[in-house]
Image (cartoon, rainbow, N blue to C red):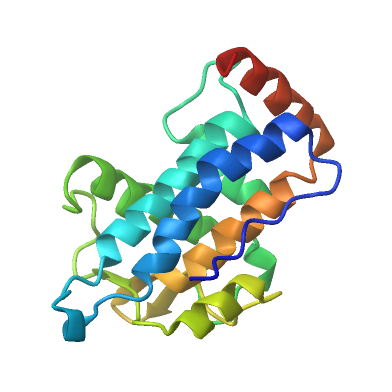
Amino acid sequence: MAYTPLSFDSNTPRTVRDFIRAHLDMQFHDVHCMFRLPMPAHDIGAGCNFAAANTLLSLVSGCSVTLYEQGSQPRKSGQFFRGVLDGFYPWDLEPPNGAAKKQAIELLYDQFRNPLAHAFGIQEKKAKGLILGIGKGTSQEGDIEALEKLKTTGLPTIAVVPGSKTLIVEGLYWGVREMVRRLTGDTKRMKAAETYLKKVLA
């Protein structure tokens, strides 16, 4: 399968580029493969909706503490996670049916990331009457490859209709890839990330 590696700014330090290639690309490639599922003809009935979403949200979290901020200051729970999404996720390209930036960030952290990471997806803080979902289609290989090359998708990260909010895995996948690209263009943060990675990977 022709997975397209992540893009990064041409001035990204080599240590950071090598880290992205060795630690991030393989996890995005995992999600690339999950988009092919389910495959009933091969007795693979699992769609991996939750697994794909959880992987992507974990990648946001990982980027937030390795590439965005390295924990040099006390922080509140979720501060870096929210910060990297606020500063670098492509909210400017969200379609009209997507959740607004501030609401989407809170939903991603409170209603999706934390429940998936800590409570099997159980929603303890869900608003009464609100239906939350995770949506992922079954894609052909060519469609996945095309998604990775798009400049914008037209897909929301969180689709909003009355009474429900659905995390769209394809939209999140493209958005987190673009987030990484934009983040590597921040020279100051990349220099700090280079210093941090040299220390912890030595």
Pick the quarter of the image with the C terminus: top right
In percent of width and height, residue 102 lies at: 54, 56
In percent of width and height, residue 39 lies at: 24, 80
Please give the name of the residue rendered at 34% of the width and 75% of the height, measured from the top-left corner.
136
Please give the name of the residue rendered at 71% of the width and 74% of the height, measured from the top-left corner.
151
Q: Quadrant of residue 58?
A: top left
Nearest the camera: 190 or 27? 27
Q: Is residue 61 left or right of residue 149?
A: left
Please give the name of the residue rendered at 31% of the width and 54% of the height, measured from the top-left corner.
111
In percent of width and height, residue 188 lies at: 81, 30
Considering every residue shown, the one lying at the far right of the view is: 11
Is residue 202 depicted above or below 87 in this figure?
Answer: above
Is residue 169 depicted above or below 160 in this figure?
Answer: above
* Residue 136 visible within the image: yes
Q: How many marks?
A: 0
Q: Is residue 38 left or right of residue 158?
A: left
Q: Is residue 83 left or right of residue 27?
A: right
In percent of width and height, residue 60 lies at: 50, 46
Nearest the camera: 173 or 15? 15
Is residue 30 depicted above or below 45 in this figure?
Answer: above
Nearest the camera: 167 or 176? 176
* Residue 89 visible within the image: no
